Amino acid sequence: MATGLSSRFTDLGRVGHKHKGFTQSGALDTNSHMLANAIMQVSITNPTIEVLLGGFEAVATQDTEIAVTGAQASVLIDDVRQPLNRKIVWKKDGTLRIIEPALGARNYIACNKRFKTRLFLDSCCAVTREKTGGMNFDGKGFQVADVLEYETGIHSAVSTNASINVRLSPIAPDSKGIAHKTLTTMAVPATTLAKVYVVRIVLGYQQALFEHKMKARFFNQRFTVSNEASNMGIRLSGGSIGEIAVKLYSEGIANGAIQITPDGLPIIMLAERQTIGGYPKIGSIITIDLPKLGQCRPGSIIQFEECDVLTARQEWLLGQIRMNNFAQNQLSRND
């Protein structure tokens, strides 16, 4: 196995444990994680392999099926190019390689069987800073020569949060009186990949600390993702929006919260953020746009747009329905 810059098991994170001091963790591009599992017709909670900036290589020890989603990377099995966002047959002794993506940062590999993982607080995620999770409970990702195994006797059903599940539409009977059904063609709900990412934010209660001209500078310029970008957060470079002189008590930080540092530049907090922080927060990225940040890499451009809470929730619900519709459609194709 070759691990590239970073390869590891991931899932939807450690939900409900921040009060104990543990970070949420989980897939940075949750959309691509769920999409990979939906293509394989397994639960969205199943672990996937998250690969950062390619360089992943592994040999199959048995026939299996996988799906690779996320960044615009070349996926090869024995040097034969394979499609993204589709089910792929991976034969025994075949070598899978993921090349550094041309666009985006992270790819996700799902399997038709559940990977065997060790759980810490209900999640398989490895968090280096906390030294928690991972294959050896040391917070580390995959190492060369690691062997990835499957659970036995587990049959995972598609599981989503939305409720729409009718994917087959009846059509008129044919000349013999036999009724047929046709499958609905569904667009793949893939994460947007771009050189410039427009992300929407809901202003928070601390917005009153920011003068009008500071907000204008924040929304009317493009920021660049610096080299200080990780699963913890993204530090942006650009023009300073100004300094907030008020001293604040540390408090809990949400996924996607945007802190403004004393130099007047934003830091976007991500899945492995610390649980508390004291920099002033101008607002938070809406949930439906968070997966875009998982595909940002140093040099990517980010521009912020203001969004209201009702629109943010509507967009999230529509995203859930689109993923559910796609998952149910995939399941119906094998009925």
Image: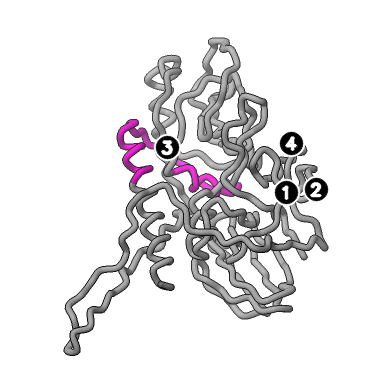
Q: Amino acid at mark 2?
A: Asn
CA gap, disc 1 and disc 4:
18 Å
- 64 or 254, nearer to the observer: 64
User: Badge 1 local density, few (<14 within 10 Å), some, or many (20+)?
Assistant: some
CA gap, disc 2 and disc 1:
8 Å
- Element type where label 4 sits in the image: loop
Where the N terminus falls, by quadrant? bottom right
Q: Amino acid at mark 3?
A: Ile
Disc 4 target residue: 129
Mark positioned earlier in the residue sequence (4 or 3): 4
For discs 1 and 4, the disc positioned in front in the rendered view: 1
Q: Amino acid at mark 4?
A: Arg
Q: Residue at x 38, y 36 (%)?
A: 305
For discs 3 and 1, the disc positioned in front in the rendered view: 1
Q: Residue at x 46, y 54 (%)?
A: 191
Disc 1 target residue: 118
* Range shown magenta: 289-317
User: Is 307 one of the magenta-colored residues?
Assistant: yes
Q: Say whether marks 2 and 1 touch (CB < 8 Å).
A: yes
- 195 or 278, nearer to the observer: 278
Q: Is residue 194 left or right of residue 106?
A: left
CA gap, disc 3 and disc 2:
34 Å
Disc number at residue 235? none
User: Badge 4 local density, few (<14 within 10 Å), some, or many (20+)?
Assistant: some
Disc number at residue 286? 3
CA gap, disc 4 and disc 3:
26 Å
Mark positioned earlier in the residue sequence (3 or 2): 2
